[in-house]
Image: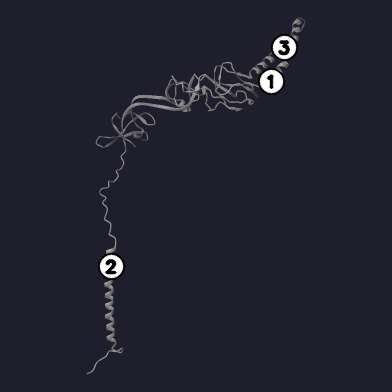
Amino acid sequence: MSMKWWTAYSSPNHVTRNARQRGRLVSTLIATMALSVAITGCSVLPDEPEEEDFSAIELPKISEKPTYEVTTKTLETKVQGSGRMMSLTEKTLYFTLEGKRLKKLYIEPGQQVEEGQLIAELDVDDLKKTLRSQSLAFKQQELQMKKTLQTRDEMDPLEYEQAVLNFEQARQGLIDMQEEIDKAVLTAPYSGTVVGLSVQEGAQIKAYDAICTIADPNNLVVAATMSRDDLEKIAIDMEVQVDINNAGKFTGKVKQMPTTNNSNNNGGGQGGSQEPLRLDQFLLVEVKDLPKTVTRGTPLSIAVVTNRKENVVVIPTVALRTIGARAYVQIAEADGTKREVDVEVGQQTATDVEILQGLTPGQKVVGR
């Protein structure tokens, strides 16, 4: 009996077949494992979110333009201004002498003064000294004039006339100097209150500079300033709506138009050249029955009614449309439709437009 052993030196074809079989086995095993991993991986991935339902959400509507009702009302056109309370009996005092110092001040702000009371005095000691000296010299001239009169018939007529002329000139010089000295004193022109004081003792005073203002606090008037264009629209006796700070609203009438330009000065200052405020610089408004709480200087505002119409057909300004010279509106009908209508426009204010033709009260117009 014989046996056949396979050794390393066995046939090469047989070895190749075995290697191929093993390779196919490994490839199959790897593919199986990959498929298993893939299946396992799918089980651990997160669940896909469910799709949201947007059917319940309402989309925003496009905003509709507002509509306004055509109405009737009293339409007023006004012009505005501002000012303060002033006294009808009010005067700013000043000296007419130039280049003198204020020697004495006898008043203080808010003080009550009586008519004729001493207010202030300038230093004119030099003028007083000169006046005393010239007065003594004039006495000598008086003596000489008496002698001239006694011998008039013996004198040449021309010589006599010259002597009289010289005497009168000297006397007039004394009168003029006394008048200059008198100008150095200020007195109250009437009883009232010192409402403004612009200088201090020792200040160098210029002619016509404001020294103080005296007013009667019981005789007040509304004084306001306005633009030149607005003043041209105003006339005497027009209605004025006045709003006085901390006092309320009142109705008055235009009493006086300004006759000079208001430069908005504040009454001058120490050694300054500003002119004092005067009543003729303001639009004056008469208001009856003012409360006692209103005092001079209280700020205020005014509105002058320059035009007023009653039972006017109006629409808001935001409802009026224009293209060139054409003025029209959009009317909103009851069925929801809109149509354009040309209108004739009259008086206009900041909020309303008068419609002369084209609309009737109760209709609806569409805003822009």
Amino acid carrying label 2: it is Ala
Please state, as top left, top right, bottom left or bottom right, where the N terminus lies in the image.
bottom left
Q: Nearer the viewer, residue 255 or 359?
A: 255
Splitting the image into 4 quarters, where does residue 20 fall? Answer: bottom left
Residue of label 1: 125
Residue of label 2: 38
- Residue 144: x and y in percent read 76, 9
Question: Seen from this angle, which residue lies furthest bottom?
Answer: 1
Q: CA distance from mark 1 to mark 3?
A: 26 Å
Residue ID at (28%, 85%): 15
Tell me if residue 175 can be seen: yes
Assess whether mark 2 and mark 3 are in contact (beta carbons under 8 angstroms): no
Residue ID at (69%, 18%): 128
Tell me which numbered mark, 3 or 2, is placed earlier along the sequence: 2
- Residue 249: x and y in percent read 42, 25
Q: Secondary structure at mark 1?
A: helix
Answer with left or right where residue 365 lies relative to residue 171.
left
Q: Secondary structure at mark 2?
A: helix
Answer with left or right where residue 158 lies relative to residue 301.
right
Q: Nearer the viewer, residue 46 or 71?
A: 46
Categorize mark 1 by other alpha carbons within 10 Å: few (<14), some (14-19), many (20+). Answer: few
